[in-house]
Image: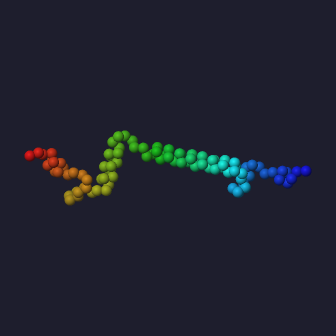
Amino acid sequence: MLAPEEVFSSSASALRARSELTPTEKRVLRTKERKLKKRQRDALDKSVGKFSKVKGTGAVKKQKQAALDGLVKHGKGVTIVGKDSVSLRKHKNRTT
């Protein structure tokens, strides 16, 4: 005579609570979750790297200049901190 558990045994893929899983099943489940998350992270990093690549060597300088032009208005009385003015460069080169 068979016990009811043996007659009506559920399939291995049936949903069970974590507390009902054996240690081996818990480890397998955790490994699957980690691999899935790793694949998602790698795909995201790969796509971000693909779209954020700088094209060409002069692209960085052009980006910096565009950002500077967007932030600082050119005109009379505007001083850009960190940039030497043309007149200061001329005086610096002279030796008397």
* Position of residue 93 measured from the top left corner of the image (x, y, whole percent): 15, 45
* Position of residue 57 measured from the top left corner of the image (x, y, whole percent): 35, 40
* Residue at image coords 78%, 51%: 10
* Residue at image coords 84%, 50%: 6
Drawn side of residue 1 relative to residue 66, left or right = right
* Position of residue 7 measured from the top left corner of the image (x, y, whole percent): 85, 51
Q: Is the residue 21 above or below the residue 56 in the image?
A: below
Drawn side of residue 53 relative to residue 68, left or right = right
Drawn side of residue 28 relative to residue 7, left or right = left
* Residue at image coords 64%, 50%: 30
Residue found farthest to the right: 1
Residue found farthest to the front: 23
Drawn side of residue 84 relative to residue 50, left or right = left
* Position of residue 15 measured from the top left corner of the image (x, y, whole percent): 72, 54
* Residue at image coords 47%, 47%: 48
Q: How many marks?
A: 0
Residue found farthest to the left: 96
Q: Nearer the viewer, residue 48 or 5?
A: 5
Q: Nearer the viewer, residue 74 or 24?
A: 24
The coloring applied to the image is rainbow
Residue found farthest to the top: 56
